[in-house]
Amino acid sequence: KQSNQVANYDAIVIGAGFSGLYTLHRLREAGFSVRVFEAGEGVGGTWYWNRYPGARCDSESIYYNYTFSEELYKEWTWTSRYPEQPEILSYLNFVATKFDLRRDIQFKTRVTAAHYNEENNKWHVYLNDGTSVSAKYFITGVGCLSASNVPNFKGINHFKGEWYHTGHWPHEKVDFKGKRVGIIGTGSTGVQAIPVIAQEAEHLTVFQRTPQYCAPARNHPYDPEYIRQAKENFSEIKRQMRESQGGQPVIPSTKSALEVSPEERKRVYEEAWEKGGLGLFTAYYDVTINEAANETVAEFVRTKIREIVKDPKVSQNLLPSYFYGTKRPIIDTNYYETYNRENVTLVDVKKAAIEEITPQGLRTTEAEYELDTIVFATGYDGMTGPLLKIDIRGKDGVSLKEKWAGGAQTRTYLGIANAGFPNMFMITGPESPSVLSNMPVSIEQHVEWISDCIEYMREHGLETIEANVEAEEAWSKHCREVAESTLFTKTDSWYTGANIPGKPRGFLIYLGGVGAYRQKCTEIAENGYEGFALMTSFKTISL
Ligand code: NA7
């Protein structure tokens, strides 16, 4: 498999999204040789692939960016509160140009395998063009939501029309004009795409399995004065984001939803609804930990749905019943309103499941639907999926798949490292705050921690760093305990692995908060990388 002369680097990074770009910049500035491999033709990661209609971010733009460079923060100006995909992709291209990153990125190249070799303490990384490279450090910036989930529906290969998954959208515009379109899935992605596709398609049929809680985004262009103030307050915003619970400068509520009067609660919820965004989620501290508190928000949203959607039968089918916020809270633009359109039909596939995709469309147990185009907004094999697509093997040839038993019952140390996988680091890996935070903040924290660690290794003449089994067990246990103290584990979602048939259940995200997690990681580093074994020599001594 391996030629005699492979290119060797200090570090190999997979992915040129937010994670890979900053890792490259940071390690290169510290004097290391770095090579990034990226499957796409350009930078952007998530924002390169997700080009579906309506794709936008649900973190506010002035917080959804890097903060490692004040100059960069001040040079870039966002146009609106929730930026659309093309604008975020332009931002990442701007970053790549500003820091001259593309010269160390090999595009259109997929990493198929990465094997640790104990003989020479190198990671041997195999590429889809048949070549291989090696490095001392192996860093994954593969994203949390990049392994698309296309359900294995019978007949999909015989469909005569076109079908797309939202996470792999074509670069050229998909034309829905005059088409009968079906969309499966009503998560964050479906909710963004449905109102936009409905405006263009002749008819849109939404196949919904679980109704969702949404709140209006109230997107709007930014007032230049607001932007000016954000730029002026850069340092303070950065500090607040880094110390916060969710990665945005939100001061957490200290009040319970149950300690205030129903009138006061309604006033607070109405205010959050009018302001738009994720305000309902953060209105009271116990919304995601106490069932009765949760029900107050849930019922508030259900009332809004009943008010907005005119046909009572349709609105009834749109009422969610799971614990509010335990699937990703969604912010929308005219989502519920879209069901008042003549050309939109809602089909409840929990009542009548999808049986098969037919050559002409889709059949449920109750009816057949003729469709020209099917859009799968069916989500991802989250967190572990992107890593397990690659044949990653650590010491003794043990694969990550074997270690994690292929599912959501992962064991990691801090979501960054794995026992048995020396010198490998995961950016926003399973059991880190990752997707339940404002991603760029969590990504920057990991990149800085990892690059500081690599610099520490160089300064101290160290060869390997590897998480201890005990430290890993303790972290995973802590991660599970925090999750179990909330309502999150009571709902089937991609956080638990439940969306992928056969994936063992667990809880893939650390819910302790961005600020507390950062502090923990910093302490570990300051204590000489507590919980890790650091070695000056890697050679196995054979007797
Ligand atoms: P999600 O949130 O996982 O949503 C996927 C949707 O697809 C959801 O409504 C699912 O219903 C539905 N789904 C999945 N498989 C099926 C099958 N087999 N039949 C019918 N319906 C199905 O993915 P998104 O892309 O919307 O969002 C992912 C993340 O991106 C989001 O959380 C943010 O972090 C950004 P279900 O709810 O499982 O019943």
Image (cartoon, grey):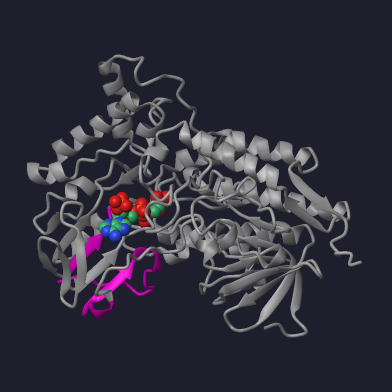
In which quadrant of the rendered image does the N terminus lie? Answer: bottom right
Give the camera-side residue of 143 and 280. Answer: 143
User: Residue visible at 72% across and 47% down?
Assistant: 468
Answer whether residue 239 is visible to the viewer in this image.
Answer: no
User: Residue visible at 37% across and 54% down?
Assistant: 499
Asked if residue 528 lies left or right of residue 72, the reply is: right
Magenta residue check for 175: yes
**Which percent across, then down, holds residue 85?**
41, 59
**Which percent across, then down, holds residue 336?**
20, 46
Give the camera-side residue of 187 and 282. Answer: 187
Q: Which residues are magenta?
A: 157-186
Q: Which quadrant of the structure image shows residue 275?
A: top left
Give the camera-side residue of 101 and 330. Answer: 330
Asked if residue 278 lies left or right of residue 509, the reply is: left
**Which percent across, then down, holds residue 93?**
54, 64
Answer whether residue 368 is visible to the viewer in this image.
Answer: yes
Give the camera-side residue of 39 and 368. Answer: 368
Residue lying furthest front in this view? 543
Report the number of numbered marks.
0
In which quadrant of the rendered image does the C terminus lie? Answer: bottom right
